[in-house]
Image (cartoon, helix red, strand yellow):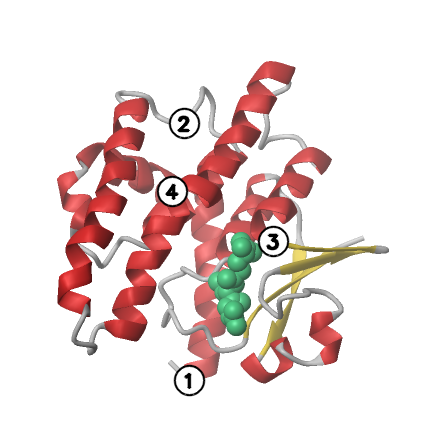
Amino acid sequence: MTATITAFAASPDRGQGLARDMRVRWAFEEVSQPYDVRLVSFAEMKAAEHLARHPFGQIPTFEEGGLTLFESGGIILHIAESHPGLLPDDPDGRARAIAWMFAAVNTVEPPILERSMAWLLERDKPWYEARLPMLDANVRNRLDQLSAHLGDAEWLDGAFSAADVMMVTVLRRLGSSGILQDYPTLAAYIARGEARPAYQRAFAAQLEVFKAATGG
Ligand SMILES: N[C@@H](CCC(=O)N[C@@H](CS)C(=O)NCC(=O)O)C(=O)O
C-alpha cells in the first residue's frame, strides 16, 4: 500500500524546499518507498477534513492503511522503523539516532525558527533591530555546539540516519541568513546531505509542485 502525505499546494518558501514535507519526502526516497502527495491550500488545512488528520491544521501528514500521523519527526521515525536504511540495527545506535532526531526539532530548530519568523513577521517593526542580536546569539550558540560535536565526522552519529534527515533540513532554513558562512563544518554537512541522490529526488518533486503552482 502506498502512503499519502500532505504538502502545501502553494508553498510560501518559493521553491526552496523548506516546507516540512521535504524531510518526509527525503526519508521516503532514502528507503526507496513510493508515496503519493495530497496538495492542500491554506483554507483546506484549516477545514474539518484536514483537521481530522492534523489537529493543528498543518502539513505534513501521513496516511497508510488505517494509520494517520502528523508531526514530521513522528512520521519519519515511523518510516525509519518500517523500512531498513534510516536507523542503525544495534539498539544503542538506534536510540542515539532517535535522540538526535529529537535534538534537531526540539533543541536546534526552535532558535532558528524564532529568528526566521521574526524576520518574516517583525522586520518592519521598531523593535526588530534591537531583538536581532539576541536571536542571532541563540542560533549561534546552538551552531557552535553542533559544529563542535560534528568535528570531522560526516554524519551526526556514525552512518547517515534519520537524524541527519532531520538536522540537515532544520539547518537549511538558515540558508539565506548569511550565518552559515561562519560555520564551514555545518555548511559542508548540509552540502553532503543535499548531494545525496535521495535528497535531490525529494527536492525535485517538491520543486515541481512550486513550478506547477506558479506556472514557472
Ligand atoms: N512540528 C511540526 C510543524 C509543522 C508546521 O509548522 N508546518 C508548517 C509548514 S512547514 C505549516 O503547516 N504551516 C501552516 C500553518 O501552521 O498554518 C512538524 O514538524 O511537522
Residue 82 disc label: none
Q: Residue furthest right?
A: 66
Q: Nearer the viewer, mark 3 or mark 1?
A: 3
Q: Earlier in the sequence, mark 4 or mark 3?
A: 3
Residue carrying label 4? 108
Q: CA distance from mark 3 to mark 2?
A: 22 Å
Q: Nearer the viewer, mark 3 or mark 2?
A: 3
Q: Earlier in the sequence, mark 3 or mark 1?
A: 3
Residue 40 in percent (x, y) is at: 60, 76
Residue carrying label 2? 156
Mark 3 neighbour density, 10 Å: few (under 14) some (14–19) many (20 or more): some
Mark 2 neighbour density, 10 Å: few (under 14) some (14–19) many (20 or more): some
Query: Which quadrant would residue 194 be assigned to in this image?
Result: top left
Q: Earlier in the sequence, mark 1 or mark 4?
A: 4
Is residue 95 left or right of 206 when viewed as pictured? right
Asked if disc 2 and disc 1 are in contact, CB closer than 8 Å, the reply is no
Asked if disc 1 and disc 4 are in contact, CB closer than 8 Å, the reply is no
- The number of numbered discs placed on residues in the rendered structure image is 4
Q: CA distance from mark 3 to mark 1?
A: 30 Å
Residue 215 disc label: 1
Q: Which quadrant would the C terminus be assigned to in this image?
A: bottom left
Residue 71 disc label: 3
Q: Is mark 3 within 8 Å of ligand 1?
A: yes
Q: Is residue 128 above or below residue 110?
A: below
Q: Nearer the viewer, mark 2 or mark 4?
A: 4
The disc labelled 3 sits on which kind of residue? Glu
**Residue at point 63% right, 39% down?**
77
- Label 4: element kind: helix
The disc labelled 4 sits on which kind of residue? Val
**Residue at point 20% right, 52% down?**
134
Q: Is residue 147 above or below residue 180?
A: above
Q: CA distance from mark 4 to mark 3?
A: 16 Å
